[in-house]
Image: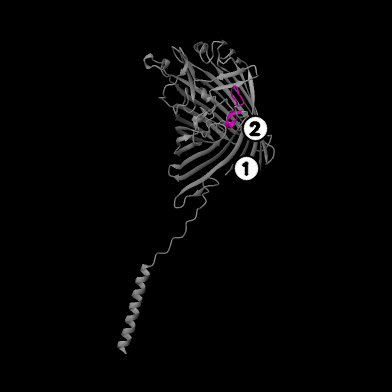
């Protein structure tokens, strides 16, 4: 009996041991699935990246628009003379995608922001923040607008210029060619520091890329400043390489009533060699500058959400701070069949056998934005820009390719006026259909005839654009 009991107990112990060994071989219990959690620290649309304390937000828009009587996408007014070979309209489709990440640290929030666009434009070179298309070349249609890091008050990378207003070149318009101030919507490489003083008061200082990529014969830098050099054959590329970034400062006050901002920029003018030959030397480097004041008014008695945005800019040797950031340096409107032409040439300066004669440019632009009801809104916008050359600069340019021997008065400056309106319909949230019309007018200061035989005469032109845009 004792022998049988011992056998039973031994068998049971063996089974328990075997069961324990088998249990040890079984896989561990899987961890619970970690679902994406909402991050409410930085506003709607942010989520925690699983397994981290970093919040991320994806956004963007899809846009389809068509411009009529335009030289390119964005409603640039048709330039110069046209024939049956020119398109009367230009269509474009764009997908924009942006990624915003934020992480709370002991030094404050670390933020990264990336914005990329994919364009397809018919009838001309595609454009996606690439200077190449402005010169009429081709590109992939992909552009990086913004790519920057913000940390402890610093901004490093490609971001909106600290000189710009919050509305950049869009006080109320759709078109990217409302000139009269800087249009830096595609961003500029920079290192900047912003100090917050409380009550909506801030100040920024930055070093911003003044070289970028050379485009065409005489464009340079992100603001594509133009500097004319003259030799016995006429005009040639006057730019030398950049050695100093633009120095930019800004003071801003943001309140419930709106915004007030003052900005200033220093811009180096550095030429190439006389006639492009190193042995002939070059003018001494000099500095240009630009200043801007801006005002935005909100909570107007005309209705909830109505606003007025307004800025005025003056430059001396830094023309692209007034002629936008995507606009051409030459504006030219053709007139009647008699061959009249109105042209304004913008530049940072002119040089011959001496110092640089800086070009003075100033402009004003603004818009009144009104909401008729939750579905309909409109904007009335306009601008005025003056380009002026000194007597010494005009003497250098006389009888060159810019003026021609048939010009009785060589003065490549002038005035450009613009006025327009846009009507928007938003049937559902984040889906907007809009139509915009704009009239642009050039008062040329040239007198006589151009080299192509056209007579210098004031002229204007209309542009019209329609757009559908879905934000997400």
Indicate the colouring scheme: one colour
**Seen from this angle, which residue lies furthest front?**
84
Residue 355 spot, x, y in % from top left? 44, 14
Occupied quadrant, residue 471: top right
Residue 14 spot, x, y in % from top left? 33, 77
Crowding around mark 1 (Cα neighbors within 10 Å: few <14, some 14 to 19, many 20+) is: some
Report the disc number at residue 233. none
Disc 1 element: strand
Span colored in magenta? 70-84
Q: Quadrant of the image for the C terminus?
A: top right
The front one of 426 and 441 is: 441
Would you say 274 lies left or right of 255 here?
left
Say above or below: 394 vs 460: above
Residue 336 spot, x, y in % from top left? 65, 19
Report the disc number at residue 436. 2
Report the disc number at residue 431. 1
Q: Is residue 283 visible?
A: no
């Amino acid at each position: 009996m004792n022998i049988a009991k011992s056998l039973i107990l031994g068998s049971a112990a063996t089974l328990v041991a075997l069961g324990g060994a088998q249990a040890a071989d079984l896989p561990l219990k899987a961890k619970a699935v970690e679902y994406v959690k909402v991050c409410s620290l930085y506003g709607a649309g942010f989520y925690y990246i699983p397994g981290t304390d970093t919040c991320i937000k994806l956004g963007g828009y899809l846009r389809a628009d068509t411009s009529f009587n335009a030289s390119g996408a964005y409603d640039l007014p048709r330039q110069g003379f046209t024939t049956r070979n020119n398109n009367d309209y230009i269509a474009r489709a764009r997908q924009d995608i942006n990624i915003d990440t934020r992480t709370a640290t002991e030094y404050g929030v670390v933020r990264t922001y990336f914005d990329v666009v994919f364009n397809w434009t018919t009838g001309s070179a595609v454009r996606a923040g690439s200077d190449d298309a402005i010169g009429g070349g081709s590109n992939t249609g992909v552009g990086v607008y913004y790519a920057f890091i913000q940390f402890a008050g610093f901004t490093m990378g490609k971001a909106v210029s600290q000189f710009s207003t919050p509305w950049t070149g869009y006080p109320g318009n759709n078109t990217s060619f409302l000139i009269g101030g800087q249009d830096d919507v595609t961003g500029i490489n920079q290192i900047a520091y912003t100090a917050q003083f409380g009550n909506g008061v801030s100040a920024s200082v930055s070093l911003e890329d003044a070289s970028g990529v050379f485009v065409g014969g005489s464009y340079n830098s992100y603001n594509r400043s133009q500097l004319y050099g003259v030799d016995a054959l006429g005009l040639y590329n006057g730019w030398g390489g950049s050695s100093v970034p633009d120095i930019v400062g800004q003071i801003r006050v943001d309140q419930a009533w709106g915004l007030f901002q003052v900005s200033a920029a220093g811009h180096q003018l550095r030429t190439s060699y006389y006639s492009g030959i190193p042995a002939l030397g070059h003018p001494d480097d000099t500095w240009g500058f630009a200043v801007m004041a801006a005002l935005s008014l909100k909570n107007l008695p005309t209705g909830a959400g109505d606003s007025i945005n307004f800025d005025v800019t003056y430059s001396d040797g830094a023309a692209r701070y007034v002629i936008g950031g995507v606009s051409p340096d030459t504006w030219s409107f053709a007139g009647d069949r008699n061959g009249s032409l109105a042209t304004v040439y913008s530049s940072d300066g002119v040089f011959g056998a001496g110092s640089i004669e800086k070009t003075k440019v100033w402009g004003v632009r603004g818009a009144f934005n009104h909401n008729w009801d939750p579905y309909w809104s409109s904007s009335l916008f306009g601008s005025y820009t003056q380009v002026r050359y000194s007597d010494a600069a005009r003497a250098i340019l006389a009888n060159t390719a810019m003026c021609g021997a048939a010009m009785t008065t060589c003065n490549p400056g002038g005035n450009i006026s613009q006025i327009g309106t846009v009507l928007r319909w938003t049937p559902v949230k984040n889906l907007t259909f809009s139509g915009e019309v704009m009239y642009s007018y050039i008062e040329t200061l040239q007198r006589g005839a151009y080299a192509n035989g056209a007579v210098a005469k004031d002229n204007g032109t209309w542009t019209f654009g329609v757009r559908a845009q879905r934000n997400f």
